[in-house]
Image (cartoon, helix red, strand yellow):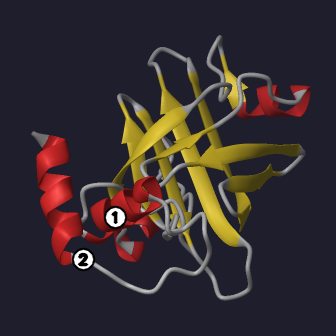
Amino acid sequence: MRWLVLALLLDGCGGPATSAADDSAGAQLEAAATRAGLVADPKGSIQGSWARDTDRLCVVESGSGASRIGVTVDYGEGQGCTASGTVSRSGDRLRVAFAGCRFEARFDGDRIRFPADLPTDCEKLCTGRASLAALSVDRLSDSRSEAGALRSAKGALLCGG
């Protein structure tokens, strides 16, 4: 059924192709689905609030290229992580810097994923057996004010200020 809807969307859509690869049926279908809002735009903004279960992440974009990023993981009873820092983007790659903890995450339009193997400096951001490794969050909102309001368990703003 989804493909039928997309095919109907494509029938009414058109536009100039920029290359042979962009002119393929698959590329046209993907572009139509993105325009219709059925598929998230992987080139879209990373700003907003992100979450999955008790994991929360915020990104507030700045005009300088490096945006603010914050994350909180709360598994209760002394098991959690809290970090604030900067993030810069190159395509689907996000260069994250939380103090001495630096790594590359991935963005696909719908989700931000941290790698499974993080530098040992990242362990300092967590208590108990909690970890930022393999964190995966989905977009909740693209609101700057909502992202800027995310707080740690101790009340510190993670992306604001």
Q: Position of residue 75 (x, y in %)?
A: 46, 19
Relative to 101, residue 33 above or below: below
**Residue annotated with mark 1:** 34
Inter-mark Cα distance, 1 to 2 = 12 Å
Structural crowding at the residue carrying mark 2, measured as other residues with C-alpha within 10 Å and reported as few (<14), some (14–19) or many (≥20) = few
Structural crowding at the residue carrying mark 1, measured as other residues with C-alpha within 10 Å and reported as few (<14), some (14–19) or many (≥20) = some
* Mark 2, secondary structure of its residue: loop
The residue lying toward the viewer, choosing from 91 and 144, is: 91
Task: Give the residue type that dot 1 points to.
Answer: Thr
Relative to 152, residue 10 above or below: below
Residue at the spot x=50%, y=80% of the render? Answer: 17
Residue at the spot x=85%, y=45% of the render? Answer: 102
Q: Say which quadrant the C terminus sits in.
A: bottom right
**Residue annotated with mark 2:** 13
Tell me if I can see residue 150 in this picture.
no
Task: Give the residue type that dot 2 points to.
Answer: Cys
Q: Say which quadrant the N terminus sits in.
A: top left
Q: Quadrant of residue 35?
A: bottom left
Q: Position of residue 132 (x, y in %)?
A: 65, 29
Marks counted in the figure total 2
Q: Quadrant of residue 114?
A: top right
